[in-house]
Amino acid sequence: QQQVKQSPQSLIVQKGGISIINCAYENTAFDYFPWYQQFPGKGPALLIAIRPDVSEKKEGRFTISFNKSAKQFSLHIMDSQPGDSATYFCAAIPSSNTGKLIFGQGTTLQVKP
Amino acid sequence: DTEVTQTPKHLVMGMTNKKSLKCEQHMGHRAMYWYKQKAKKPPELMFVYSYEKLSINESVPSRFSPECPNSSLLNLHLHALQPEDSALYLCASSQVPPPLTGAGVGEQFFGPGTRLTVL
């Protein structure tokens, strides 16, 4: 069974700090690893994504690090702001593209002022 | 237009009611999805439409009936729901429909959702 495990379940960071969320997967047949950000009462929004042939991708304050041999990837939020407080989901899409995103369980991030 | 819109935003219905959720996108995407999300959980896939044809039904009970009238519209018809069906129902779309692969695969754009309460 394809799975993506995400940790931690919740995270509290001071304003200006670095938030780090980790994910690990158990199946090598994944082709794409997106991260989604979801605010309360809203739909998830695609934040940043990476392919397995790239080790790092940076967009503004958000960076994905990808370790193919360890089957792990992580989201780093630099200079975390209160407006970043949200739930973050990592996900993976199978190489066969069934259309089914395999989501992690989510991390609730709170950035304190 | 880079939005997925959903109506209504909130819906309260009794177990004997029939109602419909609507979703629309004008990004030219050829895949559309219905998800169900419970509080503090990730979205759970219900249905996938690829080129307006149902390609995945994740063993969803028949009281949920999807419909894709055209490439921009997706409906979810609800009938005889149970209180445990109360959830946030999300619609999404993607440029690369399954089973195609390539750039853009996995990039699903979600709508704001419909908060459904079944009494």
Image (tube, rainbow, N blue to C red):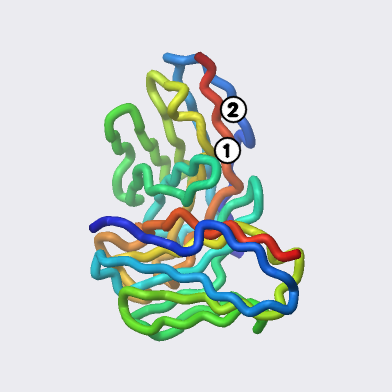
In the image, residue B42 sits, relative to residue B25, either above or below, namely above
**Quadrant hosting residue B12:** bottom right
Image point 35% across, 50% down: which residue?
A: A52
Q: Nearer the viewer, residue B60 or A18?
A: B60
Pointer 1 residue: A107
In the image, residue A57 sits, relative to residue A100, either above or below, namely above
Which labelled disc corresponds to residue B70?
A: none
Residue B73 x %, y %: 37, 75
Image point 74% across, 74% down: which residue?
A: B15
Which labelled disc corresponds to residue A11?
A: 2
Badge 1 element: strand
The reply, left or right, for residue A25 in relation to residue B1 is right
Viewer can see residue A107: yes
The crowd level at tag 1 (other Cα within 10 Å; few <14, some 14-19, many 20+) is many
Q: Nearer the viewer, residue A112 or A76?
A: A112
**Do the residues under discs 2 and 1 have CB atoms within 8 angstroms?**
yes
Q: Nearer the viewer, residue B81 or A49?
A: B81
Q: Three-letter amino acid code at disc 1? A: Thr
Badge 2 element: strand
